Image: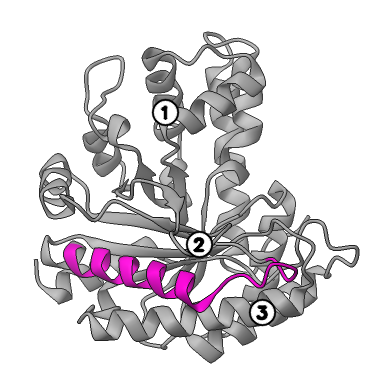
């Protein structure tokens, strides 16, 4: 696939008023979500839940793509139609999570590095054959002022892996979504989050350049510049929006087709409000949209858990409502 074709897919992923739904939870993670609402973690329940999400009526009005897990991209609806076909028929671009999760980083206590590069080329070939058009890789950066983290070694190891992954994606005809998540966990203030986020983004784009990644066929999945969840002074919506935009403008090349934000543990409404405020402060060099997981699904999951047979339609309406709200926020038109 040419870089022009990759760029077309990337632009479609951030089409006006649309964003990405992240349903790429691993089997272990979805087990925790199901346990929290009393749903047995069976393969059939996981399949049924993903079908509920992907077949929600009018979802594609506000959702351009969905990130799937390895199990999900191989599954089909109860009627036997592959999920990827259902998505493409409804104008939703299939994506796939390809990293193997985080592991302790040797020599850096308390820090992690994302693994999964071994065998990635062959896995990407298979996912492309299954219908995937883009992929996602998540790096995790922890802030601890007391422990002096993140270290440059940790940031360097993670952006190196992100860059190798991105280059392999483009080689195999997939748009890479690069996700260097700076966690909300901790008592750091918003200024510390700003400094770390800017450093991470600058180092990542330097690494992407060194590895020959074409930015016009790449999407950034970014965390917002926000106070640590244990910080006694929580920044306002306007301060989060202003500092996030300042950070992005200082570190992200304008050639990038678009930026989607992760919710990162924010409440549903806070994630929407922050995105809306950023777009109201525009125009910006790139489209700013969303790639939310829990902030898109949590309300629907709780509702579905009460009756797995009879609550499907109502849960789907809830998913659509969250997609609509975030689609409006991507245009700066959402009201609480």
Q: Which is more foreground, mark 2 or mark 3?
A: 3
Q: How is the image coloured?
A: one colour
Disc 2 or 3, which lies upstream in sequence?
2
Image quarter of the C terminus:
bottom right
* Res. 282 in view: no
Q: Position of residue 211 (x, y in %)?
A: 22, 80
- Badge 2: few (under 14), some or many (20 or more) residues near its Cα, within 10 Å? many
Between the C-alphas of marks 2 and 3, the distance is 27 Å
* Label 3 secondary element: helix
Disc 3 or 1, which lies upstream in sequence?
1
Q: Which residue is mark 2?
A: 17
In this view, which residue lies farthest toward the right? 232
Between the C-alphas of marks 3 and 1, the distance is 33 Å
* Label 2 secondary element: loop
Residue at x-position 42% and y-position 73%: 258
* Res. 86 in view: yes
Q: Main secondary structure of the magenta part?
A: helix
Between the C-alphas of marks 2 and 1, the distance is 31 Å
Q: Which residue is mark 3?
A: 194
* Label 1 secondary element: helix
* Magenta highlight on residue 237: no
Q: Position of residue 221 (x, y in %)?
A: 46, 64
Tell me which corner region of the image, top left, top right, bottom left or bottom right, holds residue 299. top right
Question: Which stretch appears magenta?
Answer: 144-168
Q: Position of residue 145 (x, y in %)?
A: 73, 71
Residue 27 marker: 1
Image quarter of the N terminus:
bottom left
Residue at x-position 55% and y-position 39%: 320
Marks 2 & 3, CB-CB < 8 Å contact? no
């Amino acid at each position: 696939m040419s870089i022009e074709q990759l760029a077309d897919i990337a632009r479609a992923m951030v089409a006006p008023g649309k964003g990405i739904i992240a349903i790429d939870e691993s089997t272990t993670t979805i087990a925790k979500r199901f346990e929290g609402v009393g749903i047995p973690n069976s393969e059939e329940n996981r399949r049924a839940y993903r079908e509920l999400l992907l077949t929600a009526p009018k979802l594609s009005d506000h959702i351009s793509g969905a990130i799937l897990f390895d199990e999900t991209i191989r599954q089909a609806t109860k009627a036997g139609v592959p999920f990827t076909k259902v998505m493409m028929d409804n104008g939703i671009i299939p994506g796939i999570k390809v990293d193997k999760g985080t592991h302790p980083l040797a020599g850096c206590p308390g820090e992690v590095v994302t693994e999964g590069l071994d065998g990635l080329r062959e896995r990407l070939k298979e996912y492309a054959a299954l219908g995937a058009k883009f992929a996602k890789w998540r790096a995790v950066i922890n802030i601890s002022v007391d422990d002096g983290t993140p270290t440059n070694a940790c940031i360097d190891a993670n952006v190196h892996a992100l860059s190798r992954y991105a280059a392999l994606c483009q080689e195999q005809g997939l748009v890479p979504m690069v996700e260097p998540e700076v966690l909300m966990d901790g008592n750091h203030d918003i200024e510390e989050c700003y400094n770390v986020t800017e450093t991470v983004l600058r180092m990542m784009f330097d690494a992407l350049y060194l590895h020959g990644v074409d930015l016009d066929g790449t999407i950034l999945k970014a965390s917002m510049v926000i106070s640590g969840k244990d910080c006694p002074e929580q920044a306002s919506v306007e301060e989060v929006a202003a500092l996030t935009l300042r950070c992005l403008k200082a570190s992200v090349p304008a050639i990038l087709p678009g930026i989607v934000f992760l919710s990162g543990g924010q409440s549903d409404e806070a994630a929407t409000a922050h995105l809306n405020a950023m777009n109201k402060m525009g125009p910006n060099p790139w489209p700013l949209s969303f790639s939310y997981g829990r902030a898109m699904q949590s309300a629907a999951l709780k509702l579905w858990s009460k009756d797995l047979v009879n609550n499907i339609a109502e849960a789907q309406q809830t998913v659509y409502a969250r997609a609509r709200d975030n689609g409006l926020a991507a245009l700066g038109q959402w009201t609480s």
